[in-house]
Amino acid sequence: MSEHNLPRRKLGSTGLQPSVLSFGASPLGNIFGDLSEEVRIAAVHEAFKLGMNYFDTSPFYGDHKSELVLGKALTTLPRDQIIVATKVGRFPGNVFDFSAERVTRSVLESLERLQLSYIDVIQTHDIEFGSLDQVVTETLPALQKLKEQGLVRHIGITGLPLKIYRTVLDRAAPGSVDLILSYCHHCLNDKTLDALIPYLQSKGVGIINASILSMGQLTKQGPPDWHPAPTQLKEATRKAAQHAERRGVDISKLAIMDALQNRHIATHLVGLATPEQVRENVATARQALGLDPRPDQALEDAVLAEVKEILEPVQGMTWPSGRPEN
Ligand code: NAD
């Protein structure tokens, strides 16, 4: 166990040690609802203070807003104690461009918005919307060049359908992909990422689990309007959240506690926008990892079992994303 408020884990062979629960910065782009910039910056500072050291953003989140606000917030944090991850290939207006020219320019633009001289982790964002051939033969080599120039330190790929990872990792040059970011596949209603973990480990890539709350489905307030889940899944998660609330337990707490039990995942990303949410989720993580007592353990364990039963009929249910061939 580390001396930090939140334990750290190895991210594949990168040498990076992210906190086990990390800062998903898409809400800084106000995509989950409007908040003042002051509150969003305070959330980043609270997260660092409480032991989070990994911050994930993208030019796509809130039309650059997330990167801009994160960049502003990070200026007062020690650079050597934070890990900053952003992405290329998915742009405002939902435009996808994985060409070498565009992703190279994108990194330079992100460095400016983030006010940084290098990016720790650069990820090809939602590759299922592009040609996976192009990702392997053009995008990854372009990012490799930026790595050689010292502008980025580690390279990753992200996306929803799990089969994209084998397609790319089986073909990419060894060592050209350091990590993968999967989302919505290791949470209460979907554990399909787990079956892929031995393969990912055999390839030596670090594993990041994003959307631990299934992009807001596993919350009291429910998902945003744009959430792409099918109605049957949204109804089941709403029913589960309401059931937990009636029993006096917050479904977000159950979701975070449950996800953190998987020790093969380097870090779990939760979308954060307020200092209160940061405090609440860090407290949950500490209880889940046995660092703090769990006064409500008996009730929480009982309600977790009930919630899992409600979600059983939709377990692993997902939605289409990207090109049909991917
Ligand atoms: P999430 O599952 O973490 O849910 C985020 C929502 O939950 C936000 O509305 C947030 O305000 C709310 N929330 C957080 N803690 C809460 C609590 N204790 N109680 C109630 N509500 C709470 O979804 P996400 O933000 O999509 O995922 C986390 C991060 O992962 C993103 O911010 C992003 O950085 C990354 N991500 C990347 C990709 C990709 O690369 N394709 C996809 C999804 C997510």
Image: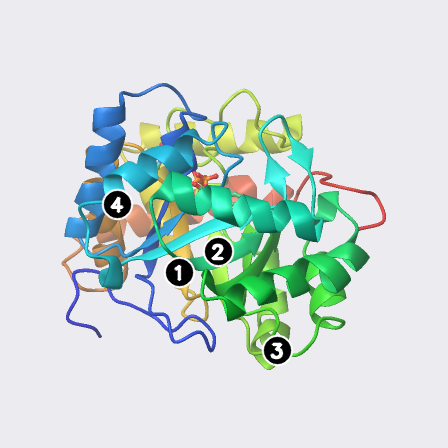
Q: Which mark is residue 209?
A: 2
The quadrant in which residue 216 appears is: top left
Which of labels 1 and 4 is toward the front?
4
User: Which is nearer the N-term, disc 4 or disc 2?
Assistant: 4
Per the image, the residue denoted by label 3 is 203
- Left or right for 237, reference 34: right
Question: Are there few (<14), some (14-19), or many (20+) residues within 10 Å of tag 2?
Answer: many
Q: Position of residue 87 (x, y in %)?
A: 53, 48
Q: Are marks 2 and 3 in contact (CB under 8 Å)?
A: no
Relative to 213, does residue 139 appear above or below in the rendering?
A: below
Give the left or right position of residue 119, taking residue 102 as reference. Answer: left
Q: Name the residue located 69 percent from the left edge and 48 percent from the top edge.
A: 98
Q: Amino acid at mark 3?
A: Lys
Choose mark 4 or mark 3, whichever is in front. Answer: 4
Q: Which residue is mark 4?
A: 74
Count neighbours of disc 3 (C-alpha within 10 A) and say few if under 14, some if 14 to 19, many if 20 or more: some
Dividing the picture into quarters, in which one does residue 40 lie?
Answer: top left
Amino acid type at circle 2 is Asn
Q: Are marks 1 and 2 in contact (CB under 8 Å)?
A: yes
Q: CA distance from mark 2 to mark 3?
A: 17 Å
Label 4 vs label 2, nearer the camera: 4
Q: Position of residue 298 (x, y in %)?
A: 25, 52
Mark sitting earlier along the chain (2/3):
3
Of the two numbered discs 1 and 2 on the same chain, state the one appearing first in sequence.
Answer: 2
Residue 297 x/y as whole percent: 23, 53
Report the residue marked by disc 1.
Answer: 267
Which mark's residue is nearer the viewer, 2 or 3? 3
Type of amino acid at the residue the image marks with label 4: Leu
Mark 1–mark 4 Cα distance, whole angstroms, equals 20 Å
Residue 93 vertical position relative to residue 293 in the rendered view, above or below: above
Query: Which badge, 1 or 3, is on the more N-terminal residue?
Result: 3
